[in-house]
Amino acid sequence: MGFTNFARKVRDPSLPYGHRVVALRSCAQLYRPIGFEATVSYLAHKAGPFREDEEALLRALGVIEASRAVWQVELRAYAAARAEAKRRGLRAPGPRERNPNSPEYWYGARREAALHAVGHWRARLRSAGLTGELSRTVDLCAADCLESGGVQGERERARLAVCADALERRMEPPAHRDDAATYFHHRDLLRVVRLIGMAARTDDEDQGADGHD
């Protein structure tokens, strides 16, 4: 079932309320640019306690629909641009051309949603225990990100790049097969690193960057 059908179920007052909440969570499964759990948390942050309050449930649906609609505008523009490029003989996208088919950030509120997700994931990682230097460094990066509202200086960018490089190297095959638990821990740390990077840019900056590609 697609996003639109689940959204229709959320709005259907004839359904049991719990089914409507599940339908909203299904929407979040289909559009989750900051991760499923962080998306559900962000919707509650923006709309209120949607698990118990119908008005909050409908507000939450409106929040996710609005973001997804902006993303779909970009998808249509990208598809049209690729079709035109193919007519000119350019069969493959350019190396700097961003493919929006998998949304990488929350459209319409990139920094706000990324900051919320950083806080969500930081709390989750801290509850599991900060074991190892990389965990502690990512936690420090997350704390700096939340304190600064996402703004980064050269020092913060360099430290984040070092973390990302180290985590990507530790996740190379056969890391998953050798130690799945450690692999997934590194994957979660890398997710936080990328969310911090998301929070460092605003929607206006994204639009400007896309316009120059």
Image: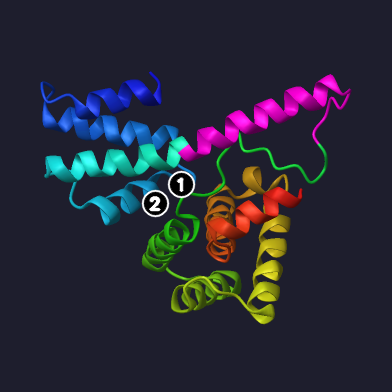
Is disc 1 in contact with disc 2, using a CB cutoff of under 8 Å? yes
* Mark 1 and mark 2: Cα distance apart in space: 5 Å
Q: Is residue 125 above or below residue 154?
A: above
Residue 21's x, y, as percent? 21, 35
**Location of residue 27 (image quadrant):** top left
Q: Is residue 37 above or below residue 21?
A: below
Residue 86's x, y, as percent? 81, 22
Taking the spot 36% from the left edge, 23% from the top edge, the residue there is: 4
Taking the spot 55% from the left edge, 70% from the top edge, the residue there is: 138
Q: Is residue 57 above or below residue 138?
A: above
Residue 133's x, y, as percent? 59, 75
Magenta stretch holds residue 150: no
Which residue is label 1 attached to?
Answer: 35
**Location of residue 115 (image quadrant):** bottom left
Left-right relation of 51 to 86: left
Query: How many numbered discs?
Result: 2
Q: Amino acid at mark 1?
A: Gly
Taking the spot 55% from the left edge, 41% from the top edge, the residue there is: 103
Which residue is label 2 attached to?
Answer: 38
Q: Amino acid at mark 2?
A: Ala
- Label 1 packing within 10 angstroms: few (<14), some (14-19), many (20+): some
